Image (tube, grey):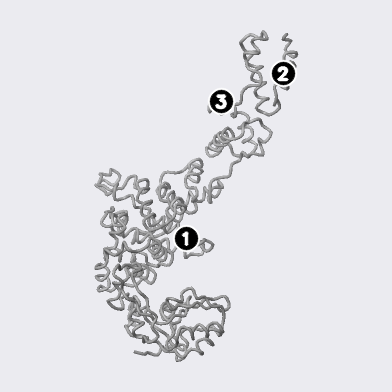
Amino acid sequence: MVNSPSVPSLIEIPEKLARVLEALPSAYLVGGSVRDALLGNPPKDLDIEVYQTKLEDLIKILQKAGKVDLVGKSFGVIKLTLDGQIFDFSLPRRDSKLPQGGHKGFSIEVCEQISPEEAASRRDLTVNSLAYDPKTNEILDFHGGQKDLKTGILRHTSSAFVEDPLRVLRVMQFAARFDFEVALETVELSKSIKETYHSLAKERVNEEFTKMLLKGVNIRRGLNFLKDSQWIEHFPELLALDQCPQDPEWHPEGDVLQHTGYTCNAMARLLRGPDAGGFSREKKLKLMLAILCHDLGKPTCTREEFKPKVNRVAIVSPGHDQAAQMPTETLLIRIGFPQPVISHVMPLVLHHMEHLTLSTPAEIRELAVQLKPASIHELGYVVEADHSGRPPLPAGQAEQMEKILYAAESLGCLYGPQPSLLTGQMIVDRNIPEGKAVGVIFDHAYRAQIQGIISTKEQAVEWFVKNRRQILENARLAPEKLIPAAELIAMGIKPGPILGKILNELYELQLDGKLKTREQATAYLREILRRNNIQE
C-alpha cells in the first residue's frame, strides 16, 4: 500500500546522497529515519534499502560517490561516507531461523528478488517498517505503521517477532523513548518468549537499557512493559520493587516500582534542562543509573511501624539507602556496566537520604569525601529527582538539600572534596620519612581540615609542626633519634626536666630537617650543654 505524505519532502536528502539515489533504479529510506520524520523529529541516521540491483553493481555505484566500507558485505550492508557522514546501504535479505535459536541464531541470505513488502515484514515493529521513496516523495506502509504512530502504539509487525528476543528489550526502550503504549498482543507475544532472554549477550542488554535511560521521556512506561511482559523476572532487583508498599501520605504515587519510574522521568527532565547542558553522556548515564537504583534496598527494609509524630501506623523503610548496596551492584553487573561506573553510582545511592540529617560544615565537607568519585552537585540531582517522583505532590528540590548545596558551594566542596591545604611543598625540607609516614600525616591533616580545625594554609603548617611528632609516634613511624636518651644519661645528664628538654629540642630540629646527621646533632648538643653550663 502506498500513501502520499501530507507535506512535501518528508526527509531532506543531502545533495551528494541524492545523486547516488538517482543512480539506483529503486531505493528507499527505511526504519528510524522515516518514523522520526513523521513524528516531527529530524532524522539522525539515513539508512537506504536498495532493490533491483546486484551487490556488485551497488558497490561500483557507491565507490564512484565516496569512501566505501565493505565490512558488512556478507550481510548485504555497505557503508558509504559522504562529507564525513556515514550512510548504510543494504540489499533486502531473508532471515532463516537456526536450530539453536536466540538473538544470533539466524542464517542471513541476501536476496535481490525480495519485494519491499516482504522486507518490511521482517522488521520488529510497525512504526519501524515504514519506507520512504525520495524520488516520488511517497511512503510505503504495508503494516499500518502510520496509524500506530498517530495513536501512539507499539505493535509487532509479524509473528517473526518471536525469533529475536532482543526485540522485547527494543520495545522496552521504544516505549520509554516515544511514550507509546504497547499493544496487548505484543505484550502477550513477549511473554511467550521470556525464557529466550538468556540467549542475549550482556552487551546487547546493556545497549537497550542505556538507550532507555538516556533517550527515554517516560521511562516508567519501559519499566512497566518489563513488568507486564514478565521480563522483569530476569532483573530480580527490579522485580522486588513491584508491590513493595510505600506510605500513601509520603508516596501517593504507589509502590516502589512506580516511584522508581517517576523518579527516572524526573531525572530525565532535569538532564534535558539548561543546567545540565554541559554534562557528558557518561555523567548523564551515571545519574540515571543512580536514580534507577536508589530504592533497591526498600524491599528488605520496609515494614509497618507506629509513628508518634503522625499518631498512626505508617509504612517505613529505615536504612534502605545502605541496604541498596548489594542489589545495586548485582543489577548493574547483570546489565553489563563496568566497575568504574558502579563505583561512581554506588555512593550516590548510599547517601541519597543524608540531606535529612546533615547540617554542620564539617558534616558537609565529610559528605563530599564520602561521595567521591561522585559529588554533592550530582547528589543534588538524585535528591531532586527522588523528591519529584511522588505525584501528585509538587516536584522540586528538597528544602534541606537546597541548603546543603548552597553551603557546599561556599565551602568549596560542591563539585568534589576540598583540596588539601597542607601540601608536599610546604614540608619538603622537613625530615619526614618518605612513604607511609608522609601519608599518615596528610591523612590526619585532612581530617583536621574536614573538621574545621584547619582553614588556611598558614594554619595547616602550624598544625603540622604541632602534631607531626605525636602522629608519627602513635603510628610507630617516627624516625630514630640521632642521639638517644641513653647516650645523654651516659654523659652524666640525670633523668628529669633538663634531659627531656634537651631531647625534645634535638628531636624537633631533627624532624624540621635542620639536623640531618649524627655529626650535626652532636655539634648542636655541645652548644646546648655550653648554654646550660653542663659539663660533658
Quick one: 356 or 213, which is closer to the camera? 213
Q: Disc 1 marks which amino acid?
A: Lys
Above-or-below relation of 99 to 232: below
Name the quadrant of the C terminus.
top right
Direction from residue 443 to residue 324 in the image, left or right: left
In which quadrant of the rendered view does residue 116 lie? bottom left
Quick one: 191 or 73, which is closer to the camera? 73
Q: Residue sitting at 69 percent across and 33 percent down?
A: 429
**In front: label 3 or label 2:** 2
| Upstream in sequence: badge 1 or badge 3 | 1
In the picture, the disc for residue 522 is: 2
Q: Disc 3 marks which amino acid?
A: Glu
Quick one: 435 or 419, which is closer to the camera? 435
- Residue 463 pos. (x, y %): 60, 32
- Asked whether residue 113 appears in the rendered view, the answer is yes
The residue wearing badge 3 is 473
- Residue 291 pos. (x, y %): 40, 56
For label 2, count other residues whose C-alpha is less than 10 Å away and answer few (under 14), some (14-19) or many (20+): some
- Residue 79 pos. (x, y %): 50, 77
Q: Disc 2 marks which amino acid?
A: Thr
Q: Residue sitting at 50 percent across and 46 percent down?
A: 368
The residue wearing badge 1 is 284
